[in-house]
Image (tube, rainbow, N blue to C red):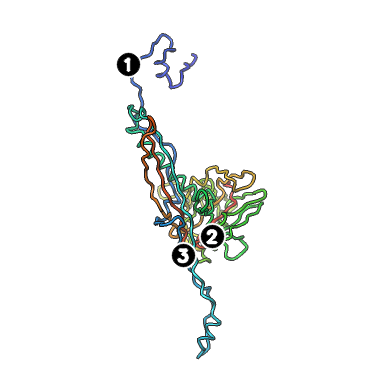
């Protein structure tokens, strides 16, 4: 028997249409439409949710950092004079003054008078619904600027805060100390001249990416430790999260059993097979492995040459206690009133990123996600 062909909307919509064979529109039949709207997009902000909050009081938000002198012998001869000791003593490290510009983030809402007046399924007030939706979108946009934009700290024109990448002490992995690890198989990278200032790095050449390995994480953890920090979180894109779990599961497995040892070890008392690795115990402390879906979003913004995609490109190793979102103006609604037969509004906030210990966090970049 041949199948029935229905118009858009399914058999019920087809039955109500005037084109349905032998049927007029059935105006007495009520649509079976649930009185709610399901939002299918994710609304989490993993990085922003993991760090603190503080207050900014100026467009250029500043703070200070200090550090101890490098450990050295302090032995002196009996009766040594102050002048002799002071002359031989290493100069006191000076406090460093750092700053980041605030960034204005905004979304607008326009709703017609008719749209507010009609009885809509799932929406009590279209204007209020759109405000809430735009607010969630704005939080996700800020998360994007924090983790994926490679923005520099810029105070001219449209101000932008320097994101995570702008605050890493970029240097080649062969130098000491190193808190950023260039994993590119080809291509070159020119670091910024100072934390948060200038540009967040310049890439050139053909960018060759590579797969994340546990040794990369171990090297970054060592660098953070040697800089006086102690990373507690490893933030990865979903694709790199899977790569990390696969590498962790296969680590230490015998080649003859193709990983059987790890599989047996990760079957718990309830018979559940645990593929995910949530806590990684390194030589320099335990770190929580956290996925961030925004780091996996396709992002071609001119940072990489030849329209290179920044999706899955980097991984963060950091201690949340050194990071805060500094708010100059908290998120608020600005009611702009009527524009003809529409009500218009705006949500706006102004904030920046505060990084109190740039040397105590790390970045791995040049990842392929595979």
User: Residue 289 at what x, y percent from top left?
Assistant: 48, 53
**Residue 110 point in image, percent of width and height:** 40, 34
Residue picked out by circle 3 = 64
Q: Which mark is residue 162?
A: none
Towards the viewer: 192 or 292? 192
Relative to 337, is 68 above or below? below
In the picture of the structure, the residue carrying the numbered disc 1 is: 28
Please tell me whether mark 2 or mark 1 is closer to you in this view: 2
Residue beneath the point at 52% across and 81% down? 74
Q: Which residue is pictured at 67% across the width and 50% down the height?
A: 205
Q: Give the CA separation, mark 2 to mark 3.
A: 12 Å
| Residue ID at (54%, 77%) | 90
Q: State the residue lying farthest toward the bottom.
A: 79
Report helix, strand or loop for mark 3.
strand
Q: Nearer the viewer, residue 168 or 100?
A: 100
Looking at the rendered image, the disc whose residue lies closer to the viewer, 3 or 1, is 3
- According to the picture, the residue beneath numbered tag 2 turns out to be 195
The reply to whether dot 3 and dot 1 touch (C-beta < 8 Å) is no
**Residue 263 seen in the current view:** no
- Determine the image quadrant of residue 128: top left
> Which x, y percent locates residue 335?
36, 40
What is the C-alpha distance between the residues marked 2 and 1? 68 Å
Q: Please tell me whether residue 189 is drawn above or below residue 227 in the rendered image.
A: above
**Mark positioned earlier in the residue sequence (3 or 1):** 1
Label 1: which secondary element: loop
Q: Earlier in the sequence, mark 2 or mark 3?
A: 3
In the image, is 32 to the left or to the right of 306? left
Residue at the front extreme of this rendering: 340
Secondary structure type for disc 2: loop
Q: Closer to the N terminus: mark 2 or mark 1?
A: 1
């Amino acid at each position: 028997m041949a199948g029935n062909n229905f118009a858009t909307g399914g058999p019920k919509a087809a039955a109500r249409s005037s084109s349905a064979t032998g049927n007029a529109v059935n105006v007495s039949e009520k649509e079976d439409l649930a009185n709610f709207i399901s939002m299918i997009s994710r609304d989490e902000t993993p990085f922003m949710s993991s760090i603190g909050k503080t207050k900014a009081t100026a467009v250029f938000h500043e703070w200070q950092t200090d550090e101890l002198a490098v450990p050295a012998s302090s032995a002196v001869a009996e009766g040594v004079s102050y002048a002799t000791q002071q002359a031989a003593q290493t100069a006191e490290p000076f406090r460093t003054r750092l700053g980041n510009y605030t960034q204005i983030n905004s979304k607008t809402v326009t709703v017609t008078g008719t749209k507010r007046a009609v009885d809509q399924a799932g929406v009590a007030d279209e204007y209020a619904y759109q405000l809430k939706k735009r607010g969630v979108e704005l939080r996700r946009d800020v998360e994007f600027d924090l983790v994926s934009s490679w923005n520099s700290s810029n105070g001219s024109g449209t101000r932008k805060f320097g994101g995570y990448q702008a605050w890493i002490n970029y240097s080649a992995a062969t130098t000491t100390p190193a808190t950023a690890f260039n994993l590119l198989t080809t291509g070159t990278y020119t670091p910024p001249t100072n934390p948060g200032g200038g540009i967040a790095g310049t890439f050139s050449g053909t960018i060759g990416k590579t797969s994340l390995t546990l040794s990369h994480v171990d090297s970054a953890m060592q660098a953070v430790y040697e800089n006086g920090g102690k990373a507690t979180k490893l933030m990865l894109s979903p694709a790199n999260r899977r790569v990390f779990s696969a590498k962790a599961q296969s680590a230490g497995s015998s080649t003859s059993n193709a990983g059987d040892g790890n599989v047996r070890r990760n079957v718990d008392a309830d018979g559940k097979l645990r593929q995910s690795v949530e806590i990684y115990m390194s030589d320099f402390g335990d770190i929580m492995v956290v996925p961030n879906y925004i780091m996996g979003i396709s992002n071609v913004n001119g940072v990489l040459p030849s329209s290179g995609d920044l999706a899955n490109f980097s991984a963060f190793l950091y201690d949340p206690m050194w990071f805060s979102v500094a708010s100059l103006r908290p998120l608020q609604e600005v009611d702009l009133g009527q524009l003809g037969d529409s009500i218009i509004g705006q949500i706006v906030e102004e904030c920046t990123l505060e990084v109190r210990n740039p040397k105590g966090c790390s970045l791995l970049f040049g990842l392929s996600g595979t």
